[in-house]
Amino acid sequence: MSARVLKFAVIATMLVTIFLLFQYPLRRIDSDSEINFNEGWNAYRQAFARDGMPLYGSPPDLSTGATNYPPVSFHLVGLLSFHGDIVRTARWISLLSLLATAIFIGLILSELGADSVIAVFATLLYILGITVFLPDRLGMDDPQLLAEAMTTAGLYLYLRAKDSALLLSASALAFCAAIFTKQNLIAFPAAVAIDLLIRSRRRFAIWCGAVVGFSAAFLALTFAHDGRYFFQHLLVHRAYSWDAGLGSITHLYLLTFQGVMLVALVWTLCRFRAQPLVALAFLLSNALAFVLVGGDGVDLNIYFNGFAAAIIVCGLAVAEVDRIHFGSEPQPGPSPVVSGHAVAAALMMTLFLCVAIRVPERLREAHLRQQYMSDDDAGFRAAVDLMKATPGPALCESLLACYRAGKPYTFDTYTAIEEIKSHHTDEDASVPLLRSRHFAVIQLDAQPGEAMNQPPTIYRQRSRFTSEFVDTLLENYRLVLRTSHMLIFVPK
């Protein structure tokens, strides 16, 4: 098999694999049930933004916590929903952002000299990697992938800028928009700043001036429209665990992408001086993710930026291998037994297989979830209908259930337990409210086995609630509805 045929065979196989992996996430976009706890939290903020309610109008409190994301995604989703369903709009934006990021990765590699086949390969490898690593983030209401598309666009515009002050300013705008969507995405602009300092002080001054100007504009709009407590919300303290962080890095991220990370690391060590921008983007984005991942509530999407940089590096490595022994002048001595084209094709196949090794597992999971999706949606709607029919405030472990039921956002279960983990308080702020039966209805997520008739002591095993909360709940509330994923309580 020739190298060219092998390359196209790899790309064709990747397309088929991605097509199969996308079937369940595409059907899930119209699902009523939540994909992740964050969906309800985001839905409330997006609704606030659409309705003109300030996101940072008052300091963080013990009941509703902090809006610890910047405002751009909330306003964008609210605007694009056209007073329709916010959650479905945000899910489509997230899915399209994943594709946009992948396309920008391909464009970046083309700008750096890779041929179109290798650029397409890198585009598909990014999509496949995210889909295999964290399938729940595919088409989920969350701003991370939208911000990833913006910051990758900023890197592409910088490479395209050459001597264009306009494109350089557009790059600064894209980076600022990304940071005001998700504040952790500082690695790519930091790499660009260092690269500009090395290459041209004049262009550095133009770019920095644009960054300062756009940041000031975003900040002024945020303070004017969303309130003056922006920084208090953004800088709210989180509990931190080094053990959890190290476990996440070694057992999840590096284990899933060990082939990609090995190639990227070797290339970075060997070619740092030749391509400092890409090498810095890879090192800074992954180092930042490794530091932040130990924070309580930080999900695996923290690695997305580092993975995008690793894919760009791997694409460059394949492109450079592909050019071995193919200069404009004939090489002295006998022709090589193995050409650079063949090695590049083999490297493409190896990188694909390293990522695709988990595809059968993901397809099995998707098949099982799809079988139960209609039942899960029916159970979710039943719980929401009951909550709608029960007047008064609600406490929901699934914030999307409270949002769908039209309940005001008055209590965030994550906040109460986070305050205890952070050692800000030893008291569970929700317990007095339960004793006074303040909530007219309480929803908890069912754990495995709880949909069956089990002793009530099983309810104490909760990650988002203290044992005191559970004991007080069972003393003052009774269970009125069980579904496959939800438990609904009302006062006794």
Image (cartoon, helix red, strand yellow):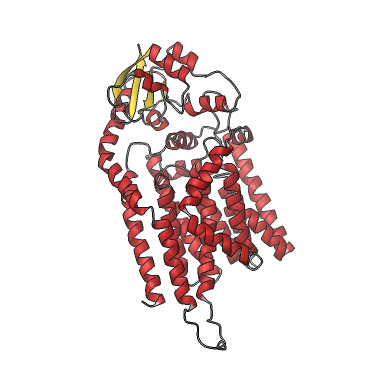
- In x, y percent, where is residue 63? 52, 23
Q: Give the image quarter of residue 231.
A: top right
Q: Give the image quarter of residue 484.
A: top left
- In x, y percent, where is residue 13? 34, 64
Residue 71 visible in this rendered orientation of the protein: no
Residue found 33% across the figure and 37% down from its top: 32
- Residue nearest the observer in this picture, 235 or 238: 238
Q: Quadrant of the N terminus?
A: bottom left
Residue found 49% across the figure and 76% down from its top: 340
- Residue nearest the observer in this picture, 67 or 370: 370
- In x, y percent, where is residue 319? 51, 71
Is residue 378 shown above or below 309? above
Q: How many marks?
A: 0
- Residue nearest the observer in this picture, 226 or 262: 262
Q: Quadrant of the C terminus?
A: top left
Residue 491 visible in this rendered orientation of the protein: yes
Going by the image, does 246 lie left or right of 13? right
Residue found 38% across the figure and 78% down from its top: 2
Residue found 53% across the figure and 59% down from its top: 262
- In x, y percent, where is residue 452? 27, 25
Is residue 412 shown above or below 80? above
Residue that protrudes farthest toward the right in the picture: 201
